[in-house]
Image (cartoon, coloured by chain):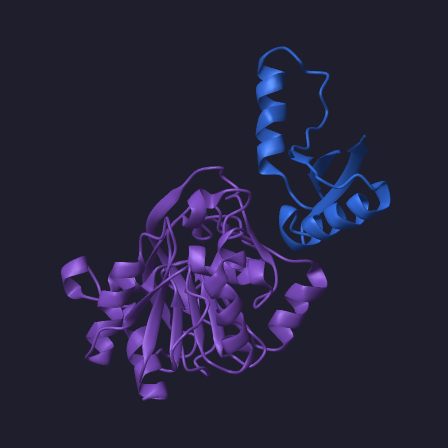
Amino acid sequence: MKARVHITLKSGVLDPQGKAIAQALGNLGFGDVHGVRQGKYIELELADTDREAAAERVESMCQKLLANTVIENYRIDLDD
Amino acid sequence: MKAAVIVFPGSNCDRDVAVALEQSLGHAPRMIWHGEATLPDLDLIVVPGGFSYGDYLRSGAMAAHSPVMGEVVARAKAGVPVLGICNGFQILTETGLLPGVLMRNASLKFVCRDVHLRVESSQSMFTNAYEESGVVRIPVAHMDGNYFADEDTLDGLEDAGRIAFRYCAPDGASSPDANPNGSARDIAGIFNRERTVLGLMPHPERLSDDALGGHDGRALFDGLVAALS
């Protein structure tokens, strides 16, 4: 089973890298971009075949290591 | 007094801080590799600067879960003093021993220069050799030193007098220009609730000998040795 984890900054947390990307896009002629928030994407190959158990494991991984919940949110998608 | 410096793959200030400690202590500290799961009897643990584990995932995130850090956290909770400098501060926030997080510098640039710090409290084993509200000059060298915590946490730190150092102008005044990384409320270093753990981004070990261009950092190590010996 594959887990896809999207990690994004919480709203209210400043994202200077996102701002720099938005500015660069503007310089390239994409002035219609009003905001950019950048984050991380992590793919996990899991031995687990039980969906519920896998979801629980990945949730725990996010809490313990993959995300810093002081500043980041995460979303987990599971593929069979 | 028994002191130890933790060494991770990618640490690069471990020897510098060992030299600074030895100068104040009179003997060399123990150097302890990150793979050790047990620690000897210690009076002080230093988590040094550098780029532990290549800053993979987030600065300090991997080191926070290394075998030795489990033991460091346990000792810290039992009251053993812990000093985290730069990457050491990042690691301590990732372990939860200190609140908040060190984010990418607001400028998105690596900042390596001397900064001025105002000593917010001299009432700790780390800062007792400094004058309260005094200004010291100590270098920073980091990419991720932008201290962030939610407003309630920041208020709590201020109310409890847990801010150790703030970035300031040479005359001690607060100024956006004096803040090298965008840190909330100009925070450069904080204590835990019991003031037995200090994390700070500036490097006191890098200005602890006149041969290095100054000695404002030395008082931190002298003060620690005086308090713990």
- Among the chains pictured, the one given blue colouring is A
> Which residue is more in the foreground, A65 or B158?
A65
Please report the residue visible at 58 percent of the width from the left and 34 percent of the height from the top. Answer: A17
> Which residue is more in the foreground, A62 or A39?
A62
Q: Where is residue A40 in the image (x, y as percent from the top left)?
A: 64, 35
Quadrant in which the C terminus of chain B is drawn? bottom left
Q: Where is residue A61 in the image (x, y as percent from the top left)?
A: 68, 49
Relative side of B16 to A53, left or right: left
Relative side of B144 to B130, left or right: right
In the displayed structure, would residue B126 be above or below residue B154?
Answer: below
Where on the picture, by quarter, is residue B154? bottom right
Q: Position of residue B86 (x, y in %)?
A: 42, 57
Please report the residue visible at 44 percent of the width from the left and 38 percent of the height from the top. Answer: B109
Question: Farthest residue in the top direction?
Answer: A29
Please report the residue visible at 74 percent of the width from the left and 43 percent of the height from the top. Answer: A74
Q: Position of residue B90 (x, y in %)?
A: 50, 56
In the displayed structure, would residue A67 be above or below residue B154?
Answer: above
Q: Colour of chain B?
A: purple
Where on the picture, by quarter, is residue B201? bottom left
Relative side of B222 to A69, left or right: left
> Which residue is more in the foreground, B227 or A78?
A78
